Image (cartoon, rainbow, N blue to C red):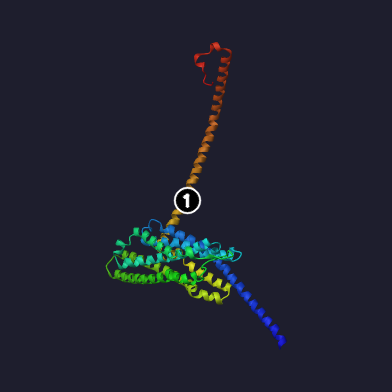
Amino acid sequence: MTTNSTPLVTVGYMINETTQVSKTSHYLFIIHYLSIYALVLIIIGTVGNLLTIIVLLRRHLRRFVTVRWLIAVSICDIISLYGWNLNNFYKFNVSSRNSNIEDISLFHCRFISYMTFVALQLSSWCLTAVSLDRALNLYWPQWKRLYGRIRYTKYYIMVLTTICLALNSHILFLNGYRTSTGIITCYSTRSNPDYIYPQWERVHLVLYNLCPFAIMLICNTYIIFVTVRSSRTQQTELTPAKLQRKSLERYRQFTALLIIVTFAFVLLTLPACIYFVFFRNYFVTKAHRTYRFMVQIFLNSIQFTSHGINFFLYCFSAKSFRHELHGMFRELLTSCQCKCRLSLKDNRQHDHIRQYINNNNNNIEPIIQHQQLLYNRDMQMNRYKFNFFPEFKSTSDKNPNWV
């Protein structure tokens, strides 16, 4: 019995090692494609948010307060995509040692983490301001006239930006340190390894997700209630049918836009926040390192999807946005066609002019040759008179033009 136990233990150990290697390779396979998805999300999100900004800046949309807030949301979303999302692609596809971008230097550590936290929080609060502004317009009719004017929007955005920058400013001075061997350790301090995870991440969860979600939920519930009640009132009153349809359509579009964007934001961002606050430390001590990376990059991909798909949500839920987008592409296509036509027309005109000159040159060339012969003959005669018969030289020839 004793002689057979050692081979059995060895075989069991080898089977466990083989299983572990198989799981690790499976996790790495998933991580590789999730990191590629992170890069694709950066590209699609950047293009989508830039298109959103261009469309919202068009003449028919930029005069609305809501549009100014949505432009700020798109700018913050672009900035947030280039933080941890880009790091996931760099870590598992570019770096040979699977190191983070934040580990390159203290500047990278502090600047990337600072801008990511600020952009995420500011994006959620600008989105919250859209719902809050709409709810205040419905609850208090004087809001738009007193405090909700479009010229005040830039000041509100500046105040929110200043608050978010100030709240996260400690990251620029405290986050990360350099060890005695020269290695950068980010998201912690020398005396506090839990500085960012989970301590500041809990504050970030409240600022980025819980508080905005609570405000958006209350405001959107009130907006839906007022919209349904006003639509029923309009149906009972004797108002023109066309006016009823336009008013109802406008209410429904705006309500659908707010509900869809809010629902997508909460659904996609909440899982990552809950993991980093409550389960990250547990996974550090209990789960395999590769498995932990897979879970984190998967949740980050879901979270940042919320900041990369708003363009598609606007297209899906807002008819006016689709109309302006279609008009922008139509104008762009018309402009390109006009430039091509003008270029072809200019080329044709140049060809006609060139052909006309060539034809005229064929007719004028004999005359020019004849005049040149006469001119050469006169020059020779003048020289002859000057050299051999100076006494017959006239007064006008004393200073000949050809001298």
Q: Which residue is drawn at 49% across and 73% down?
A: 275
Q: Where is residue 357 in the image (x, y as percent from the top left)?
A: 52, 35
From where the camera sits, is residue 356 visible?
A: yes
Give the amino acid type for the residue marked by disc 1 in the picture.
Gln
Relative image position of residue 79 (x, y in whole percent):
47, 61
Say how many tags the image has: 1
Tell me the residue at 46%/49% (across/down). 338
Residue 143 position (above or below residue 291)? above
The residue to which callout 1 is attached is 337
Identify the image quadrant of residue 237.
Answer: bottom left
Residue at horizontal 33 percent and vertical 67 percent from the top: 136
Front one among 279 and 219? 279
Q: Give 37 or 231, whichever is nearer the viewer.
A: 37
Rate crowding at label 1 as few (under 14), some (14 to 19) or many (20 or more) other CA atoms within 10 Å: few
Residue closest to the far left: 238
Q: Residue furthest bottom?
A: 1
Q: In which quarter of the image is the N terminus?
A: bottom right
Q: From the viewer's perspective, is residue 109 above or below residue 280?
A: above
Q: Is residue 234 left or right of residue 303?
A: left
Residue 213 placed where, x, y %?
41, 71
